[in-house]
Amino acid sequence: MPITSCPQCPSENVYPDGALWICADCAHEWTPGEASESTLVVRDSNGNVLVGGDTVTVIKDLKVKGSSIPLKQGTVIRNIRLVEDDAEHIEGNSDKIKGLVLKTCFLRKA
């Protein structure tokens, strides 16, 4: 089966270079054996790839369980952490609420 897309980003602009495959868009290099392993890619509501340490913005008002303070649209969450084996959730802290676990569908990369 030929490799048609990068395991790190959604780009299909990949090419072989000896034993390695290289993505021309993000410069990720991998061997065909690595590509068959499931690589966790976390994306925001717009499809942008999120990595640990990124800053995201809340795109809609959210009620927070266990808190009387809602997260308002535009709230910034800095230095996010990815949840292991879960592409739909991230962990982070806002200025007022600590220890948040948020769904990526309500976030956009800042």
Image: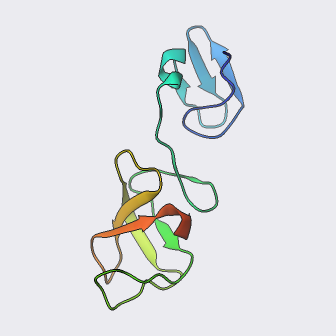
Image-quadrant location for residue 10: top right
Query: Which quadrant holds the C terminus?
Result: bottom right
Residue extending furthest toward the bottom: 68
What residue is drawn where x is 51% and y is 72%?
57
Foreground residue, 70 or 17? 70
Query: Which quadrant holds the N terminus?
Result: top right
The picture places residue 106, in percent across and down from the top left corner, at 53, 70
The picture places residue 77, in percent across and down from the top left corner, at 41, 71
Residue extending furthest toward the top: 18
What residue is drawn where x is 31% and y is 84%?
96
Residue extending furthest toward the front: 65
Colour scheme used in the picture?
rainbow
Q: Is residue 30 above or below residue 75?
A: above
Q: Is residue 17 left or right of residue 90?
A: right
Residue 110 visible? The answer is: no
Foreground residue, 76 or 5? 5
The picture places residue 47, in percent across and down from the top left corner, at 63, 55
Image-quadrant location for residue 89: bottom left
What residue is drawn where x is 57% and y is 75%?
59
Q: Is residue 95 left or right of residue 2?
A: left
Q: Is residue 34 above or below residue 69?
A: above
Residue 47 visible? The answer is: yes
What residue is drawn where x is 59% and y is 40%?
9
- The number of discs equals 0
Q: Is residue 15 left or right of residue 38?
A: right
The picture places residue 44, in percent across and down from the top left corner, at 55, 59
